[in-house]
Amino acid sequence: MGKYTAVADDVASGTALKTILQIANPAANPASHRIAVYGYRISYRGTNSAAQPVRTLIARQTAAGGGGASVPVAVPVAKLDPTNPDSTITAVKGPAAAWTTEPTLGEVLSAQRLHPQTGMGEFIPLGDELIVAPGGWLAVVVVAAATVDVTAQLYWREGH
């Protein structure tokens, strides 16, 4: 079971609901090839100490959306153990005009309001990971009152 990560670095949030980092488990994968997301990190590089908090979501999406900057150039998937096989998933980032159509928000699995000059990280306990079945998407999504640069990272295991 391989462990992987992907980072979307310095993505401009805009002021509407925006997908910052999305991973997709291809529908062509067998039903047994589930992805278990076991951690995430999000940080903001705001300039206004009095700015409103950024609504920060980890969510499933019901449609992939259109566009996004695709791998390998935009969001390379990194192996946490170099002896693992290559990941079968796709990771994309946006928005910064990369999404021609914003992905459709589904179930919200985690929601926080974070100051735009800070961030957070969480590792999810074994057995409680966020599962992405074949044909599914999971993303870091933000809503900011003013545009702020966002860095988002997801950690997952494949074949879970």
Image (cartoon, grey):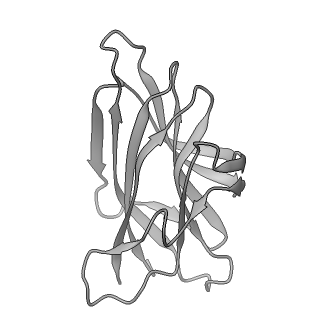
Q: Position of residue 140 (x, y in %)?
A: 49, 46
Viewer-nearest residue: 135 or 147: 147
Query: Is residue 71 something that shows in the picture?
Result: yes
Q: Quadrant of the C terminus?
A: bottom left
Q: Is residue 146 above or below residue 85?
A: above
Q: Residue at x 59, y 44 (%)?
A: 95
Identify which residue, 13 or 25, lies in the foreground: 13
Q: Residue furthest top?
A: 50
Question: Where residue 17 appears, x then y in whole percent?
Answer: 62, 33
| Residue shown at the point (62%, 74%) measured from the top left | 134
Total labels drawn: 0
Residue 103 can be seen in this image: no
Provide residue 79's location: percent of width, then percent of height. Answer: 32, 77
**The one of 148 and 64 positioned closer to us in this rendering:** 148
| Picture coordinates of residue 108, whole percent (x, y) | 56, 42
Where residue 1 sits, quadrant-wise, is: bottom left
Residue sitting at 57 percent across and 30 percent down?
14
Q: Quick check: 56 left or right of 32? A: left
Vertical position of residue 135 compared to residue 30: above or below: above
Compared with 51, 83 (above or below) is below
